[in-house]
Image (spheres, rainbow, N blue to C red):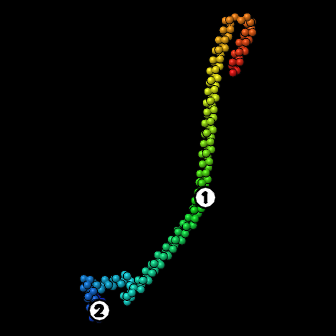
Amino acid sequence: MEDVNIKSIRYPIAVDVKLESLSLKFGRTKKLFFEQMVDYFYKSKKDPKDLSDEVLKKELSNGNSRIISFVRKQESDFLLPTFSNLGKLLILSNAHSKYLEGLSQYAVSDESQTRRIIAGMMLLEKAIVKTQTNLDEKAVLKTKFSKILERYISSRESLGWTDSSAKKEELQGLARESLKNI
């Protein structure tokens, strides 16, 4: 089996003391700590010389710029058309409000007109009832008067007036016809 540990690094004793201190602090061997440190700098792409993390700040700034750019794009694609359509919707809403207001006024006038028509129909119904009552009373009066006339005719005949029979018949027919025309 081939040994993979063939490379070596030379560094001063002061650095070795720091490396030893850090490896003990994190509970690792110096070799493992060094490997993890190299992996960290490799993955994070941080410059160990750059203590204030300028590269990281630059990447964060680029990330922020991308986010702001994305938000602006969304704003132009979605918010601005929404606001412009909102104006159109407000105009339509106002037009519909005027239309509905007109319908409301029409409904009020239609209701008052309907009430007047109903009142007129009620008056007409009362007049029809009164007319029907009068017609019924007229029929009753005709019947009573007819009985009175028939009784008069029969009483007169029983008295035996001497007038001619033709004149009597003519008088009776005339009286009956007048009664029907009442």
Percent across and percent down for residue 70 are 49, 74
156 versus 99 height, above or below: above
53 versus 173 height, above or below: below
Q: Residue 167 occupies which quadrant of the picture? A: top right
The residue pinned by badge 1 equals 95
Amino acid type of disc 2? Val
Q: Nearer the viewer, mark 2 or mark 1?
A: 1
Residue count near mark 1 (Cα–Cα under 10 Å), binned few <14, some 14–19, many ≥20: few
* In the image: residue 63, left or right of residue 113: left
27 versus 86 height, above or below: below
Amino acid type of disc 1? Ala
Q: Residue at x 59, y 62 (%)?
A: 91
Quarter of the figure that contains the N terminus: bottom left
Q: Is residue 1 visible?
A: no
The residue pinned by badge 2 equals 15
Badge number at residue 64: none
Q: Residue at x 31, y 83 (%)?
A: 36
Along the line of sight, the residue nearer the viewer: 13 or 52: 52
